[in-house]
Amino acid sequence: MTVLGIETSCDETAASICHDGRILSNIISSQVVHSSFGGVVPEIASREHELMLNSIVNDAISEANLSLGDLDAIAVTQGPGLAGALLTGVSFAKGLSIGLNISLIPINHLEAHIFANFLADPNLSYPFICLLISGGHTQLWLVKNMGIYDLLGETRDDAAGEAFDKGSRILGLGYPGGPQIEKISKNGNPTKIIFPRSLMGSDNLEFSFSGLKTSLLYFMDNFQESKEYRLADVAASYQQAIVDCLSEKLARAIMKTGIKNCVIAGGVAANFCLREELNNRIRNAQILYPDLEYCTDNAAMVSFLGEIKLKSGYKSNLIFNVSPNLKLN
């Protein structure tokens, strides 16, 4: 089967072709226009999707050496995400589905992130623990089987990716914040400043990053670059606080459930400091990371999951709306 995937949940316009479990193309256009605002502007994101989506889809089909007539189905992100951005992708997908008379499969963005790990390792087996960390979500899931998910813990306020973006803005760095903080942190001392780690009680599997962000804001109010404190030290210490919280909670989830298979999903999974910390701290379990191109928002995970659902007997239904707050269960 051949499935076109479309992803427009935030500020990446993406399209991909999956054929029999293989990704034939994965085209992503990141909206750099938001960098001057220090974050995503929803109205601008929607307009950029409208501008780029048709050409991105054509590029994905062309790179796969296929034509529209070769498609068996279309998979599109239904949510969660920005309402206007989601609506752009879903409307395009519905029109194309009607025009080609092929199936349309709505996809949960969070579920697609989880299943991107099957692209990294097709032999990944259930059950496993997933640490899902992105700009909008920080969650620990027990994945028992496809469609059977137990939420072990999640953030009470900011997501880890959001903490990186807001921290980068406070530090005067660029957007997106995660890569900018990681870059400057390479020259810093992560133990120089002790920022708070919230909700670290022994049995707690939830997260909180708002206090960390506030602590950074207060610290920078009186900050001046000096021999004692460099900006790189501040960034590295802030990053380490986020990484420590994530790695500690995953270690606890492994201990609590006894499950030794773990996957990391979402944009923050691309952070090498996090990967190094997890590998050093968690020695009693296998940790799987998606390829870097499948960490951030992309359509490969959408087309891949769409084909899985199609093969499992999912029936197309054009009567669905976008769902900005779509849950995983």
Image (spheres, helix red, strand yellow):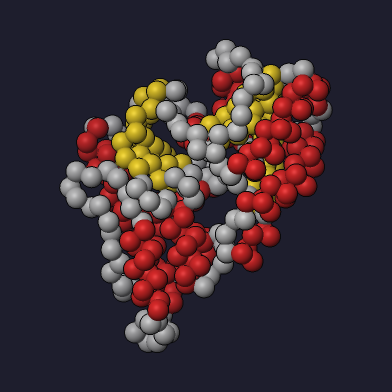
Q: Position of residue 95 (x, y in %)?
A: 76, 28
241 vs 291, left or right, is left
Q: Is residue 329 above or below residue 296?
A: above
Position of the C terminus by quadrant: top left
Q: Position of residue 12 (x, y in %)?
A: 64, 47
Residue 310 position by quadrant: top right
Residue 105 visible in the current orientation: yes
- The residue lying toward the viewer, choosing from 20 and 94, is 94
Residue 287 visible in the current orientation: no
* Residue at image location 28% in from the left, 59% down from the top: 197
Residue furthest bottom in the image: 226
Q: Position of residue 247 (x, y in %)?
A: 32, 50
Q: Is residue 147 above or below residue 204?
A: above
Q: Is residue 312 above or below residue 325?
A: above
- The residue lying toward the viewer, choosing from 101 and 242, is 101
153 vs 138, left or right, is left
Q: Is residue 281 above or below residue 75?
A: below
Residue 56 position by quadrant: top right
Position of the N terminus by quadrant: top right
Instruction: Tell how many labels.
Output: 0
* Residue at image location 58% in from the left, 44% down from the top: 82
* Residue at image location 69% in from the left, 19% down from the top: 103
Q: Position of residue 129 (x, y in %)?
A: 35, 34
- The residue lying toward the viewer, choosing from 273 and 235, is 235
* Residue at image location 31% in from the left, 56% down from the top: 244
